[in-house]
Image (cartoon, coloured by chain):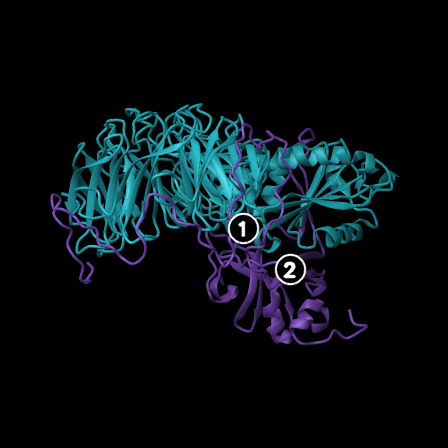
Chain colours: A cyan, B purple
Amino acid sequence: MPDSVTQIRNAGPVGSKRNLAVLGDGFTDADQTTYNNWVQNTVLGGVFANDYFYEDGSAWNIFRVNLISNTSGVSQRTYNADGTIASTTLKDTALGMIFNGSWSHCWMEYGTGTETAIQNALKKWVPDYNFVLIILNEPGYGGCGGGGRAHVTTGDGWTVIAHEFGHGLGGLADEYCNSGAYTSGEPGAVDLTVNTDRSTLKWGNFVDPTTPIPTGSGSCSDYNQGTKPATWDDNQDVGLFEGGGTKNTGIYRPVINCRMNSNTPPYCTVCYTSFKRQYDTYTGHTFLKCYAADFNGDGRSDVLVHSGNSIQTFRSNGSQLDLIFSAVERVPGSWQFQPNDQFFIGDFNGDGKDEVAVFNGVDWIMPYLGLLADDGSGGLRLTARYDGDIPGWGGFAKNDLFYVGDFNGDGKQDLFVFNGADWSMPYVGMLRSNGSSFTFIKRFDGDIPGWGGLAKNDKLYVGDYSGDGKADLYIFNGDDWSMAYVGMFRSTGTDLQMTARYDGDIPGWGGLARHDKLYVGDFNGDGKADLYIFNGDDWSMPYLGMFSSTGTGLQMAHRYDGDVPGWGGMARHDQFFPADINGDGETDLFAWNFEDWVTEYLGRMISSGNSLTASFIGDWVGEWNLGAVDRFEPCNFQGRTIRPIGGARGKPDLFVHNQDWFGMIRGNPGFALQKIYYRWIHNYRYGRNW
Amino acid sequence: MSERSLPEKPATDAPVSPAKGKGASKGKVAPRPQRIRGTLRLKTKAAKLSTSQAAGPEHYADQTGLKRTAPRGEGYVRLRIRVGEDGGTSIVDSHFVDSTLVQPSAIHGNFAYEVTEGDKRLHLDSIPDLGVFRSFVNPDGPLEERQHHIYELKTYEFDVRVPARDLAAAALPKVVITLYRVKEARPAMPVGIQPLHVQYQRELREVARLDGVPARILPEAVQKLRGMHKPSGLK
């Protein structure tokens, strides 16, 4: 077998990522499986499956260079006590490296042709590497790193390599103690200091004011300045501990025990943050695309963050979010993430936990639809995928629009799909979930009987307006006809039947108009999905209407002309997000306006069943600076017990997010910021990363 | 609020005659399909199906046919710089990389390089680890071996990246590559518009410098960009 390269992590273009080249020496053709497994288990399954490198895996391309050696194992050399060579046994290997097992000789050394062989291999297979990991087919322990390379043996564990990556990729110093006193000046590394002044300490922003400085004094100290708090975390709580950089005294480290101290613990707060800052540019992470979902069925909303070709999920414990899952390029099954993936959250298998339907009609030469479900360990894996079509639909297309709803009432969310752009007539489809895949049920070609013709700008809204446990459809069209229309289509489980069509008006509304915006929610708590309609464009003042579903039609409950009491005046660009904010089983509205006033306003409009009472907050929610770039996801991250509505819980909270910031806002009884994160979601024991 | 002259809605109990615009009103049945872009595109006839196409986990081959959605970058040049025993520098390799180069917004780690042409920065990047080799700790060894054994390298090499277009447009004799040691790291060292030695005069120390980039070492792609022909026999 000739030499080759396998890109085992494709995070993105080499110029926008950091590139790790893995080279093996002493692996024959027959050893390649051993080599592949070692790289898989130790690099991907070890270093890149834990703490920092797991979280920021999207910053790293990993290239496994498959070099074929003529003999198995590497050359061996032994040294006499005086440092002279005792013996050398050479083997014909790809790189010609020599293992000597001697600490004072860096455990291994280059043969005469090694440097050239490495350069040639890199130039051919990974021409723009940033870091090189060379693996010797040698079971003995040892390793030698520096200058952008780490040389290890198959006898080394991943934690040793992660420590070495701390030096080689993080520029971090050792935090362990060995002997002697440090007598030099301030070290350049971010994780060591000689400074004992709290006000100028370089990691001082992570030190709680109640923590004594120094925190540990004396030779390689633990916490010995006062009583160590019961909640103290030796790995994450930051103080100032004497001993580090291999010296026992005269120099200080930030935590008692970091990976840069004893390999096994995660990187400490200071080292983690240094890594994050160093490689954040290369991750491609933003908070622009976030989706609320309850992935573990604990009643609390978690969040899925999608950035380019990676996703991360963070689990709520009621007050904060913690990273649970990070996937780069793909999840097993497989689904390969792309920037234009669209995610649809729902409990598609009825297990009480949310799954993810994902559609991409843009990035590939054919559209794909996938279903991602729990992988059994908190992550996601593909359970079904449809390439280009699901039989019966007649072909997915770029502008297919998906809507989640349990249209057959079996407790599993299904999908409606609409396309009004790619074909000579519009289509509506019903795709039923059987828990692990979708089945095509029904397609409407150009019309749903009674609607008088599907049209390009039909807008679909899902809600069980009949109260029979099956998700029905409202359809609105304000663009394609001489007047605006609203239709109500009840699901029979396998079909849609029109129960009402409103031509130009719903009694009491005063005329449907082009820019009417519909919001579905059971605002009177009777188990039937009602309609809010807002129009800020077509009339001399904005209007908000409440139309309750009778099961077969709509009845106006209230119309607000120009204002909802407490909102201070509706305005043209008011936006609404239906959610049961106060947990009474009636769907309320979050209201948002960033365009029409001198500052931004976030409001709550609480339904009494047939009317609304509003309140609002302006400009800031705690530390969150409300802005035009903000996006909101109604959710329930606190997980408080709220009366279920049709199997779903209320959503009293909001995730708020933009390019760089992510916030958790409590919405009941008033707005309050629970948590704010910048660039990455991490819960510092004290302090923050900005 | 809007200054448009728009009507008020009728009262909620007033009879409404919907204002009609241009075009047709809906009938009871759908109108005939409209052609899209001159072609009649209809889905194939829907079939009644009882099974799905899904093959189950692990049965799917990779998705294929990824379109290139991002415009191709203009590429960059990767230069390998050797720092000799006397501190002198030389370019030992250069090649073109067909990818878009990201410029870091801050410097981190123990070293950083900057490529400049006069006061103009062409690129910079951090180098976490340079100039030393460390033997791994011997966990079962005597006390002295329970730490890294550090080997200072007499000569060492590092990689420099420069956007191809910038390098092609530069006056090559005026291009300077400077290697800095980060003497005093700060938690955040954002990069401003000033050269590094001005912005971080206190924190950085110059350890090596290369004045001028010979045109002959530039990759062919950059030579073309410069409108030059690579002289034969020179490498």
Identify the disc placed on residue A282.
1
Residue A330, given in percent of the width and then of the height, sits at 57, 39
The picture places residue B184, in percent across and down from the top left corner, at 51, 54
Q: Quadrant of residue B226?
A: bottom right
Which is nearer the eye, A171 or A544? A544
Along the line of sight, the residue nearer the viewer: A76 or B73: B73
**Amino acid carrying mark 1 in the image:** Tyr
Is any atom of residue A636 visible in this view?
yes
Judge left or right: residue B88 versus residue A679. right
* Horizontal arrangement in the rendering, residue B187 relative to residue A460 (left or right): right
| Residue A507 position by quadrant | top left
Q: In this view, does B59 lie above or below A8?
A: above
Q: Name the residue under label 2.
A: B98
SS at circle 1? helix
Q: Can the viewer see residue A249?
A: no
Q: For the residues marked 2 and 1, what is the alpha-carbon distance in whole angstroms?
A: 17 Å
Whether labels 2 and 1 belong to a single chain: the reply is no
Amino acid tagged 2: Asp
Tell me the number on the disc at residue A257.
none
Q: Is mark 2 on a helix, strand or loop?
A: loop
Quarter in which the N terminus of chain A is drawn: top right
